[in-house]
Image (tube, rainbow, N blue to C red):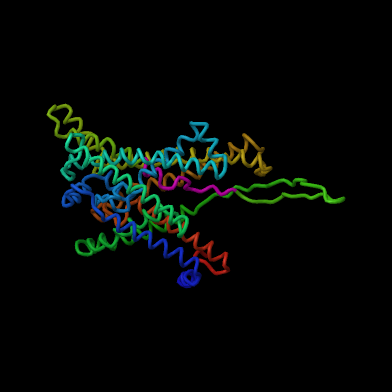
Protein backbone atom coordinates (compact mmCIF):
# COMPACT_ATOMS: atom_id res chain seq x y z
CA UNK A 1 0.00 0.00 0.00
CA UNK A 2 2.88 2.39 0.77
CA UNK A 3 4.32 1.78 -2.69
CA UNK A 4 0.92 2.38 -4.22
CA UNK A 5 0.72 5.73 -2.40
CA UNK A 6 4.13 6.66 -3.76
CA UNK A 7 3.01 5.76 -7.26
CA UNK A 8 -0.12 7.88 -6.83
CA UNK A 9 1.91 10.96 -5.85
CA UNK A 10 4.33 10.42 -8.74
CA UNK A 11 1.51 10.99 -11.22
CA UNK A 12 0.85 14.75 -11.65
CA UNK A 13 -2.87 14.41 -12.39
CA UNK A 14 -3.52 11.97 -9.55
CA UNK A 15 -1.40 14.02 -7.15
CA UNK A 16 -3.41 17.12 -8.08
CA UNK A 17 -6.69 15.31 -7.41
CA UNK A 18 -5.52 14.14 -3.98
CA UNK A 19 -4.27 17.61 -3.01
CA UNK A 20 -7.51 19.24 -4.25
CA UNK A 21 -9.50 16.83 -2.06
CA UNK A 22 -7.45 17.73 1.03
CA UNK A 23 -7.66 21.46 0.26
CA UNK A 24 -11.46 21.39 -0.05
CA UNK A 25 -11.70 19.40 3.20
CA UNK A 26 -9.60 22.05 4.95
CA UNK A 27 -11.85 24.81 3.58
CA UNK A 28 -14.94 22.98 4.85
CA UNK A 29 -13.45 22.37 8.28
CA UNK A 30 -12.52 26.07 8.57
CA UNK A 31 -16.04 27.14 7.55
CA UNK A 32 -17.47 24.67 10.08
CA UNK A 33 -15.93 26.75 12.88
CA UNK A 34 -17.51 30.08 11.84
CA UNK A 35 -20.22 30.55 14.51
CA UNK A 36 -23.68 31.98 14.04
CA UNK A 37 -24.58 35.12 16.02
CA UNK A 38 -26.71 35.15 19.18
CA UNK A 39 -25.58 31.67 20.28
CA UNK A 40 -24.46 30.72 23.81
CA UNK A 41 -21.74 28.26 22.81
CA UNK A 42 -21.01 27.27 26.43
CA UNK A 43 -24.42 25.50 26.61
CA UNK A 44 -24.10 23.55 23.36
CA UNK A 45 -22.22 20.56 24.81
CA UNK A 46 -24.95 19.82 27.38
CA UNK A 47 -27.73 20.10 24.79
CA UNK A 48 -26.03 17.68 22.36
CA UNK A 49 -25.24 15.22 25.15
CA UNK A 50 -28.96 14.98 26.00
CA UNK A 51 -30.36 14.90 22.44
CA UNK A 52 -29.34 11.97 20.22
CA UNK A 53 -31.21 13.30 17.20
CA UNK A 54 -28.95 16.35 17.25
CA UNK A 55 -25.94 14.05 17.56
CA UNK A 56 -27.09 12.16 14.44
CA UNK A 57 -27.51 15.42 12.50
CA UNK A 58 -24.14 16.59 13.81
CA UNK A 59 -22.50 13.57 12.19
CA UNK A 60 -23.93 14.48 8.77
CA UNK A 61 -22.79 18.08 9.21
CA UNK A 62 -19.21 16.93 9.70
CA UNK A 63 -19.25 18.16 13.31
CA UNK A 64 -20.41 21.67 12.36
CA UNK A 65 -23.72 21.46 14.23
CA UNK A 66 -22.12 20.88 17.63
CA UNK A 67 -20.52 24.33 17.30
CA UNK A 68 -23.69 25.74 15.66
CA UNK A 69 -21.71 27.26 12.83
CA UNK A 70 -22.87 28.55 9.44
CA UNK A 71 -22.47 24.92 8.25
CA UNK A 72 -24.67 23.58 11.06
CA UNK A 73 -27.10 21.79 8.71
CA UNK A 74 -24.26 20.20 6.73
CA UNK A 75 -25.44 18.06 3.82
CA UNK A 76 -28.28 16.35 5.73
CA UNK A 77 -31.09 18.25 3.90
CA UNK A 78 -29.60 17.19 0.56
CA UNK A 79 -29.39 13.55 1.70
CA UNK A 80 -33.04 13.76 2.81
CA UNK A 81 -34.06 15.30 -0.53
CA UNK A 82 -32.19 12.56 -2.41
CA UNK A 83 -33.94 9.81 -0.45
CA UNK A 84 -37.33 11.47 -0.99
CA UNK A 85 -36.73 11.69 -4.75
CA UNK A 86 -35.75 8.01 -4.86
CA UNK A 87 -38.88 6.98 -3.00
CA UNK A 88 -41.10 9.16 -5.21
CA UNK A 89 -39.86 7.68 -8.48
CA UNK A 90 -42.00 4.49 -8.32
CA UNK A 91 -45.02 6.62 -7.31
CA UNK A 92 -44.79 9.47 -9.85
CA UNK A 93 -44.56 8.20 -13.47
CA UNK A 94 -42.93 11.43 -14.72
CA UNK A 95 -40.00 10.99 -12.33
CA UNK A 96 -39.71 7.31 -13.22
CA UNK A 97 -39.55 8.20 -16.92
CA UNK A 98 -36.84 10.79 -16.24
CA UNK A 99 -34.76 8.14 -14.45
CA UNK A 100 -34.87 6.01 -17.63
CA UNK A 101 -33.78 8.80 -19.98
CA UNK A 102 -30.06 8.40 -19.35
CA UNK A 103 -27.75 11.21 -18.31
CA UNK A 104 -30.15 14.01 -19.35
CA UNK A 105 -32.89 12.55 -17.16
CA UNK A 106 -30.52 12.11 -14.22
CA UNK A 107 -29.37 15.73 -14.54
CA UNK A 108 -33.00 16.86 -14.42
CA UNK A 109 -33.63 14.74 -11.32
CA UNK A 110 -30.52 16.23 -9.68
CA UNK A 111 -31.89 19.69 -10.44
CA UNK A 112 -35.20 18.81 -8.77
CA UNK A 113 -33.25 17.46 -5.79
CA UNK A 114 -31.42 20.77 -5.40
CA UNK A 115 -34.72 22.67 -5.56
CA UNK A 116 -36.18 20.40 -2.86
CA UNK A 117 -33.08 20.81 -0.68
CA UNK A 118 -33.58 24.57 -0.22
CA UNK A 119 -37.03 24.48 1.49
CA UNK A 120 -36.03 21.38 3.47
CA UNK A 121 -32.95 23.18 4.73
CA UNK A 122 -34.93 26.32 5.62
CA UNK A 123 -37.50 24.28 7.55
CA UNK A 124 -34.79 22.30 9.33
CA UNK A 125 -32.92 25.48 10.23
CA UNK A 126 -36.09 27.04 11.66
CA UNK A 127 -36.93 23.91 13.67
CA UNK A 128 -33.38 23.64 14.99
CA UNK A 129 -33.33 27.33 15.90
CA UNK A 130 -36.62 27.04 17.79
CA UNK A 131 -35.30 24.02 19.68
CA UNK A 132 -32.12 25.91 20.58
CA UNK A 133 -34.25 28.86 21.68
CA UNK A 134 -36.24 26.55 23.97
CA UNK A 135 -33.00 25.17 25.42
CA UNK A 136 -31.65 28.66 26.05
CA UNK A 137 -28.79 28.27 23.56
CA UNK A 138 -30.13 30.69 20.93
CA UNK A 139 -31.30 34.19 21.76
CA UNK A 140 -33.51 36.54 19.78
CA UNK A 141 -34.87 33.74 17.56
CA UNK A 142 -38.54 33.24 16.74
CA UNK A 143 -41.57 34.81 15.09
CA UNK A 144 -41.94 37.81 17.37
CA UNK A 145 -41.58 41.24 15.82
CA UNK A 146 -38.10 42.07 17.11
CA UNK A 147 -36.75 38.60 16.28
CA UNK A 148 -38.02 38.34 12.70
CA UNK A 149 -34.96 39.89 11.04
CA UNK A 150 -32.35 37.94 13.10
CA UNK A 151 -34.35 34.73 12.52
CA UNK A 152 -34.55 35.28 8.75
CA UNK A 153 -30.82 36.10 8.66
CA UNK A 154 -29.95 32.91 10.56
CA UNK A 155 -32.14 30.70 8.33
CA UNK A 156 -30.72 32.23 5.11
CA UNK A 157 -27.16 31.88 6.42
CA UNK A 158 -27.64 28.21 7.35
CA UNK A 159 -29.31 27.45 4.01
CA UNK A 160 -26.44 29.14 2.17
CA UNK A 161 -23.98 27.12 4.27
CA UNK A 162 -25.67 23.87 3.23
CA UNK A 163 -25.59 24.81 -0.46
CA UNK A 164 -21.93 25.80 -0.09
CA UNK A 165 -21.18 22.41 1.49
CA UNK A 166 -22.97 20.65 -1.38
CA UNK A 167 -20.96 22.70 -3.88
CA UNK A 168 -17.70 21.74 -2.15
CA UNK A 169 -18.77 18.09 -2.30
CA UNK A 170 -19.48 18.38 -6.02
CA UNK A 171 -16.02 19.91 -6.52
CA UNK A 172 -14.42 16.90 -4.81
CA UNK A 173 -16.43 14.53 -7.01
CA UNK A 174 -15.43 16.35 -10.20
CA UNK A 175 -11.85 17.39 -9.48
CA UNK A 176 -10.78 15.27 -6.52
CA UNK A 177 -10.89 11.63 -5.45
CA UNK A 178 -13.97 9.85 -4.12
CA UNK A 179 -17.62 10.80 -3.69
CA UNK A 180 -17.55 14.39 -2.47
CA UNK A 181 -20.41 14.49 0.04
CA UNK A 182 -19.27 11.23 1.61
CA UNK A 183 -15.70 12.55 1.90
CA UNK A 184 -16.98 15.67 3.72
CA UNK A 185 -18.95 13.55 6.21
CA UNK A 186 -15.93 11.26 6.63
CA UNK A 187 -13.71 14.25 7.44
CA UNK A 188 -16.07 15.35 10.21
CA UNK A 189 -16.22 11.85 11.73
CA UNK A 190 -12.45 11.32 11.67
CA UNK A 191 -11.81 14.81 13.10
CA UNK A 192 -13.53 13.77 16.34
CA UNK A 193 -11.51 10.61 16.97
CA UNK A 194 -8.41 12.27 18.54
CA UNK A 195 -10.61 14.13 21.05
CA UNK A 196 -12.43 10.94 22.10
CA UNK A 197 -9.19 8.96 22.29
CA UNK A 198 -7.65 11.67 24.48
CA UNK A 199 -10.67 11.65 26.79
CA UNK A 200 -10.53 7.85 27.17
CA UNK A 201 -6.77 7.89 27.82
CA UNK A 202 -7.22 10.24 30.75
CA UNK A 203 -10.36 8.61 32.17
CA UNK A 204 -10.51 4.93 31.14
CA UNK A 205 -7.44 3.39 29.51
CA UNK A 206 -8.91 -0.13 29.76
CA UNK A 207 -12.04 1.05 28.00
CA UNK A 208 -9.94 2.54 25.21
CA UNK A 209 -8.20 -0.80 24.60
CA UNK A 210 -11.54 -2.63 24.56
CA UNK A 211 -13.00 -0.07 22.16
CA UNK A 212 -10.02 -0.38 19.81
CA UNK A 213 -10.42 -4.16 19.70
CA UNK A 214 -14.21 -3.94 19.17
CA UNK A 215 -13.78 -1.28 16.47
CA UNK A 216 -11.16 -3.37 14.63
CA UNK A 217 -13.37 -6.49 14.69
CA UNK A 218 -16.43 -4.47 13.60
CA UNK A 219 -14.54 -2.90 10.70
CA UNK A 220 -13.40 -6.34 9.56
CA UNK A 221 -16.97 -7.66 9.61
CA UNK A 222 -18.28 -4.56 7.82
CA UNK A 223 -15.72 -4.99 5.04
CA UNK A 224 -16.62 -8.66 4.60
CA UNK A 225 -20.37 -8.00 4.48
CA UNK A 226 -20.13 -4.81 2.40
CA UNK A 227 -18.04 -6.62 -0.21
CA UNK A 228 -20.16 -9.77 -0.12
CA UNK A 229 -22.26 -10.46 -3.20
CA UNK A 230 -24.13 -13.22 -4.97
CA UNK A 231 -23.18 -13.51 -8.64
CA UNK A 232 -26.07 -14.51 -10.88
CA UNK A 233 -24.79 -16.00 -14.19
CA UNK A 234 -26.14 -14.34 -17.35
CA UNK A 235 -25.84 -15.57 -20.94
CA UNK A 236 -26.30 -13.40 -24.03
CA UNK A 237 -27.43 -15.18 -27.18
CA UNK A 238 -25.69 -14.73 -30.53
CA UNK A 239 -27.18 -12.16 -32.88
CA UNK A 240 -26.70 -11.60 -36.63
CA UNK A 241 -25.78 -7.95 -37.11
CA UNK A 242 -25.06 -7.70 -40.87
CA UNK A 243 -23.88 -9.48 -43.99
CA UNK A 244 -20.28 -8.91 -45.04
CA UNK A 245 -19.91 -10.36 -48.52
CA UNK A 246 -20.91 -13.98 -48.29
CA UNK A 247 -20.27 -14.09 -44.55
CA UNK A 248 -22.54 -13.27 -41.64
CA UNK A 249 -21.33 -10.88 -38.95
CA UNK A 250 -22.34 -12.44 -35.63
CA UNK A 251 -22.11 -10.76 -32.25
CA UNK A 252 -23.04 -11.78 -28.73
CA UNK A 253 -22.75 -15.13 -27.03
CA UNK A 254 -20.89 -13.73 -24.02
CA UNK A 255 -21.23 -14.99 -20.48
CA UNK A 256 -21.29 -12.54 -17.57
CA UNK A 257 -22.97 -12.16 -14.19
CA UNK A 258 -25.19 -9.84 -12.15
CA UNK A 259 -23.65 -8.99 -8.75
CA UNK A 260 -26.36 -8.84 -6.08
CA UNK A 261 -24.86 -7.28 -2.98
CA UNK A 262 -25.57 -8.64 0.50
CA UNK A 263 -26.08 -5.08 1.75
CA UNK A 264 -27.58 -3.05 -1.09
CA UNK A 265 -29.12 -0.44 1.22
CA UNK A 266 -25.93 0.94 2.73
CA UNK A 267 -26.59 2.84 5.94
CA UNK A 268 -29.92 4.38 4.83
CA UNK A 269 -32.00 1.95 7.01
CA UNK A 270 -30.07 3.12 10.09
CA UNK A 271 -30.95 6.75 9.30
CA UNK A 272 -34.63 5.92 8.77
CA UNK A 273 -34.93 3.78 11.89
CA UNK A 274 -32.97 6.12 14.16
CA UNK A 275 -34.94 9.17 13.04
CA UNK A 276 -38.28 7.44 13.67
CA UNK A 277 -37.17 5.97 17.01
CA UNK A 278 -36.02 9.37 18.27
CA UNK A 279 -39.10 11.27 17.11
CA UNK A 280 -41.53 10.12 19.89
CA UNK A 281 -38.93 10.89 22.57
CA UNK A 282 -38.25 14.35 21.17
CA UNK A 283 -41.98 15.17 21.04
CA UNK A 284 -42.54 13.77 24.55
CA UNK A 285 -39.70 15.90 25.96
CA UNK A 286 -41.71 19.05 25.24
CA UNK A 287 -44.55 17.85 27.52
CA UNK A 288 -42.50 16.61 30.49
CA UNK A 289 -43.16 19.83 32.39
CA UNK A 290 -46.86 20.02 31.48
CA UNK A 291 -49.24 21.20 34.18
CA UNK A 292 -51.83 18.55 33.21
CA UNK A 293 -51.06 15.38 35.26
CA UNK A 294 -52.13 12.77 32.71
CA UNK A 295 -50.22 14.51 29.88
CA UNK A 296 -47.11 14.67 32.05
CA UNK A 297 -47.45 10.99 32.99
CA UNK A 298 -47.96 9.90 29.37
CA UNK A 299 -45.04 12.04 28.18
CA UNK A 300 -42.78 10.59 30.89
CA UNK A 301 -43.71 7.02 29.91
CA UNK A 302 -43.08 7.67 26.22
CA UNK A 303 -39.81 9.48 26.95
CA UNK A 304 -38.55 6.61 29.12
CA UNK A 305 -39.61 4.00 26.55
CA UNK A 306 -37.89 5.73 23.63
CA UNK A 307 -34.72 6.47 25.57
CA UNK A 308 -31.39 4.79 24.90
CA UNK A 309 -31.34 3.60 28.50
CA UNK A 310 -34.35 1.39 27.75
CA UNK A 311 -33.83 -2.21 26.58
CA UNK A 312 -37.12 -2.04 24.68
CA UNK A 313 -35.72 0.88 22.65
CA UNK A 314 -32.79 -1.19 21.35
CA UNK A 315 -34.97 -4.23 20.56
CA UNK A 316 -37.39 -2.06 18.54
CA UNK A 317 -34.44 -0.32 16.91
CA UNK A 318 -33.04 -3.66 15.74
CA UNK A 319 -36.29 -4.83 14.14
CA UNK A 320 -36.93 -1.44 12.54
CA UNK A 321 -33.48 -1.51 10.91
CA UNK A 322 -34.18 -5.02 9.57
CA UNK A 323 -37.57 -3.92 8.22
CA UNK A 324 -36.24 -0.75 6.59
CA UNK A 325 -33.39 -2.71 5.01
CA UNK A 326 -35.88 -4.93 3.19
CA UNK A 327 -38.07 -1.95 2.26
CA UNK A 328 -35.30 0.24 0.86
CA UNK A 329 -33.55 -2.64 -0.94
CA UNK A 330 -36.83 -3.62 -2.61
CA UNK A 331 -37.52 -0.01 -3.71
CA UNK A 332 -34.06 0.42 -5.25
CA UNK A 333 -34.14 -3.02 -6.89
CA UNK A 334 -37.54 -2.39 -8.50
CA UNK A 335 -36.23 0.88 -9.96
CA UNK A 336 -33.35 -0.95 -11.65
CA UNK A 337 -35.69 -3.36 -13.50
CA UNK A 338 -32.92 -5.90 -14.11
CA UNK A 339 -35.25 -8.53 -15.59
CA UNK A 340 -36.65 -6.05 -18.14
CA UNK A 341 -33.20 -4.79 -19.10
CA UNK A 342 -31.92 -8.34 -19.61
CA UNK A 343 -34.86 -9.17 -21.85
CA UNK A 344 -34.39 -6.04 -23.96
CA UNK A 345 -30.67 -6.73 -24.37
CA UNK A 346 -31.13 -10.38 -25.33
CA UNK A 347 -29.74 -11.75 -22.08
CA UNK A 348 -31.11 -14.56 -19.94
CA UNK A 349 -30.33 -16.51 -16.79
CA UNK A 350 -29.65 -20.17 -17.66
CA UNK A 351 -32.68 -22.28 -16.75
CA UNK A 352 -34.97 -19.28 -16.23
CA UNK A 353 -37.44 -18.01 -18.81
CA UNK A 354 -36.98 -14.26 -19.59
CA UNK A 355 -39.55 -11.90 -18.15
CA UNK A 356 -41.70 -12.75 -15.14
CA UNK A 357 -39.83 -15.97 -14.24
CA UNK A 358 -36.49 -14.14 -14.23
CA UNK A 359 -37.92 -11.30 -12.14
CA UNK A 360 -39.33 -13.73 -9.55
CA UNK A 361 -36.03 -15.60 -9.39
CA UNK A 362 -33.99 -12.42 -8.87
CA UNK A 363 -36.42 -11.16 -6.21
CA UNK A 364 -36.20 -14.48 -4.37
CA UNK A 365 -32.39 -14.49 -4.37
CA UNK A 366 -32.25 -10.85 -3.31
CA UNK A 367 -34.60 -11.37 -0.38
CA UNK A 368 -32.61 -14.37 0.87
CA UNK A 369 -29.23 -12.63 0.81
CA UNK A 370 -30.76 -9.40 2.17
CA UNK A 371 -31.59 -11.32 5.36
CA UNK A 372 -27.85 -11.51 6.09
CA UNK A 373 -27.39 -7.81 5.32
CA UNK A 374 -30.45 -6.80 7.36
CA UNK A 375 -29.37 -8.78 10.46
CA UNK A 376 -25.86 -7.38 10.04
CA UNK A 377 -27.12 -3.78 9.91
CA UNK A 378 -29.36 -4.44 12.91
CA UNK A 379 -26.40 -5.78 14.90
CA UNK A 380 -24.26 -2.77 13.95
CA UNK A 381 -27.10 -0.44 14.96
CA UNK A 382 -27.37 -1.88 18.48
CA UNK A 383 -23.61 -2.30 18.91
CA UNK A 384 -23.39 0.48 21.58
CA UNK A 385 -25.97 -1.42 23.66
CA UNK A 386 -24.16 -4.73 23.15
CA UNK A 387 -20.78 -3.37 24.26
CA UNK A 388 -22.21 -1.42 27.20
CA UNK A 389 -22.08 -4.51 29.40
CA UNK A 390 -18.36 -4.90 28.70
CA UNK A 391 -17.21 -1.27 28.78
CA UNK A 392 -19.93 0.17 31.08
CA UNK A 393 -20.52 2.95 28.55
CA UNK A 394 -22.29 3.12 25.19
CA UNK A 395 -20.13 6.00 23.90
CA UNK A 396 -17.87 4.55 21.20
CA UNK A 397 -14.88 6.00 19.37
CA UNK A 398 -17.03 6.09 16.24
CA UNK A 399 -20.80 5.62 16.16
CA UNK A 400 -22.35 2.64 14.37
CA UNK A 401 -23.49 4.80 11.47
CA UNK A 402 -20.11 6.49 11.44
CA UNK A 403 -18.30 3.16 11.13
CA UNK A 404 -20.40 2.21 8.11
CA UNK A 405 -19.70 5.58 6.51
CA UNK A 406 -15.97 5.44 7.18
CA UNK A 407 -15.53 1.91 5.84
CA UNK A 408 -17.77 2.50 2.81
CA UNK A 409 -16.10 5.78 1.86
CA UNK A 410 -12.58 4.42 2.33
CA UNK A 411 -13.34 1.36 0.19
CA UNK A 412 -14.94 3.49 -2.54
CA UNK A 413 -12.01 5.93 -2.55
CA UNK A 414 -9.48 3.10 -2.72
CA UNK A 415 -11.34 1.63 -5.69
CA UNK A 416 -11.14 4.94 -7.52
CA UNK A 417 -7.41 5.24 -6.80
CA UNK A 418 -7.01 1.61 -7.85
CA UNK A 419 -8.73 2.34 -11.17
CA UNK A 420 -6.52 5.38 -11.78
CA UNK A 421 -3.33 3.42 -11.07
CA UNK A 422 -4.36 0.38 -13.11
CA UNK A 423 -5.07 2.62 -16.11
CA UNK A 424 -1.48 3.79 -15.85
CA UNK A 425 -0.13 0.22 -15.39
CA UNK A 426 0.72 0.61 -11.70
CA UNK A 427 -0.09 -1.90 -8.99
CA UNK A 428 -2.98 -0.60 -6.90
CA UNK A 429 -4.09 -0.74 -3.27
CA UNK A 430 -6.52 -3.64 -3.44
CA UNK A 431 -4.92 -7.04 -4.06
Residue depicted at x 42% and y 45%: 375
Residue 204 as seen in the image, left or right of residue 338: left
Whole-percent x, y for residue 335 in the image? 53, 38
Is residue 214 in view? Answer: no
As for residue 266 lying within the magenta part, the answer is yes
Does residue 394 appear left or right of residue 418 in this picture?
Answer: left
Q: Nearer the viewer, residue 431 or 150?
A: 150
Q: Position of residue 249 (x, y in %)?
A: 79, 50
Above or below 269: residue 178: below
Residue 241 position within the rendered picture, expressed as x and y whole percent measured from the top left = 76, 46
Q: Which residue lies at the image location 37% right of the left edge and 44% below the top edge? A: 270
Q: Residue furthest left?
A: 291
In the drawing, does residue 142 fall left or right of residue 214?
left
Decide: is 234 above or below 406. above
As drawn, the residue found furthest toward the right would be 246
Q: Nearer the viewer, residue 140 or 363?
A: 140
- Residue 391 visible (yes or no): yes
**Region of the chain picked out in magenta, as a range:** 258-272
Residue 431 is situated, as x and y percent measured from the top left of the image, at: 52, 65
Question: Residue at horizontal 43%, vertical 57%?
Answer: 172
Task: Tell me: 376 left or right of 355.
Answer: left
Residue 395 lies, with reference to residue 357, above or below; the image says: below
* Relative depth, front residue between 369 and 82: 82
Amino acid sequence: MIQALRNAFRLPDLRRRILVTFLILIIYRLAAHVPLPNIKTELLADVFAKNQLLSLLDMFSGGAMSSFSVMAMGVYPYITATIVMQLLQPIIPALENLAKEGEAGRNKLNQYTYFLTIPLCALSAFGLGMQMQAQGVATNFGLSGSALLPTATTIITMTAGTMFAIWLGELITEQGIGQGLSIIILGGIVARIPQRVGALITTDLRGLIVFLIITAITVLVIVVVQEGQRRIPVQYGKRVLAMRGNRLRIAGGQSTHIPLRVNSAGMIPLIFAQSIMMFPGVIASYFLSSGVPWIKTAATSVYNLFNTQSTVYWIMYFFMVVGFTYFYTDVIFQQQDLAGNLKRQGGFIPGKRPGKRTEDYLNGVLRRITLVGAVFLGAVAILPWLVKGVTETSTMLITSSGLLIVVGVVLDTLRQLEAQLVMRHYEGFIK
